[in-house]
Image (cartoon, helix red, strand yellow):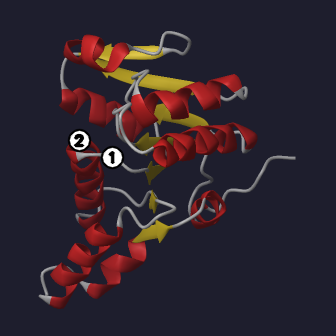
Amino acid sequence: MPPPVRSVCVYCGSSNTTKPEYLDLATRFGAAMAARGLRLVYGGGAVGLMGRVAKATHEAGGDVLGIMPRFLERREITYQDVPHRMVDTMHERKHIMFEESDAFVVLPGGIGTLEEAVETLSWRRLDLHRKPIVFLSEDGFWAPFFTLMQHTVDANLTPASYRDTVFDTHSIEECFAALGVGVRA
């Protein structure tokens, strides 16, 4: 039986100019994290979905840990209301986020979000961890990615069993069900 999920790393976009529905999803997801007593581990920024999920988790009484590379402080603007660990490189950021988390949730995002998610998936494929990985999009945002993953399975480049290690969810409740986490009493 896997250990209980207490700390969730969230990968997501840092753009304020994305669809309002994605920003709203991040806000609702952050509040849902706090309602379940989960600690948020994230990239440390105050902008975009990243800022929304952190602010909502914090404002709902949840614990938050941001990991921010110094060179991104001006671009992603550190969310000062929560604890942070400042690092020098993206590699350090991802390593600490991985070490501090029991599971991963991927909200809509761009190339940086995709890179973080794919590296975590790769580590899972190499049996470097057994932590749950859940993609969450209410509008099918990640559907093209899952089509590509199936393409690699169909080409016999990824074992079919690997698809059972990653979840494509379409609601916050479905996401937490995949993580095996309920609302705390």
Q: Which mark is residue 112?
A: 2
Residue at 36% x, 14% y: name it.
77
Q: Specify the amino acid type for callout 2.
A: Gly
Residue 127: horizontal and vertical position, in percent? 29, 63
Classed neighbour count for the residue bearing mark 1: other residues with Cα under 10 Å, few (<14), some (14–19), many (≥20): many
Label 1 secondary element: loop
Residue 166 sits above or below residue 73 on the image: below
Query: In screen coordinates, is 98 left or right of 93?
Result: right
Residue 9 sits above or below residue 162 on the image: above
Residue receiving disc 1: 109
Label 2 secondary element: helix
Residue 171: horizontal and vertical position, in percent? 59, 62
Classed neighbour count for the residue bearing mark 2: other residues with Cα under 10 Å, few (<14), some (14–19), many (≥20): few
Snapshot quadrant of residue 180: bottom right
Query: In screen coordinates, is 94 left or right of 18?
Result: left
Residue 160 sits above or below residue 131 on the image: below
Query: In screen coordinates, is 103 left or right of 154?
Result: right
Residue at 53% x, 28% y: name it.
54
Could one spot residue 169 in this view of the protein? yes
Q: Nearer the viewer, mark 1 or mark 2?
A: 1
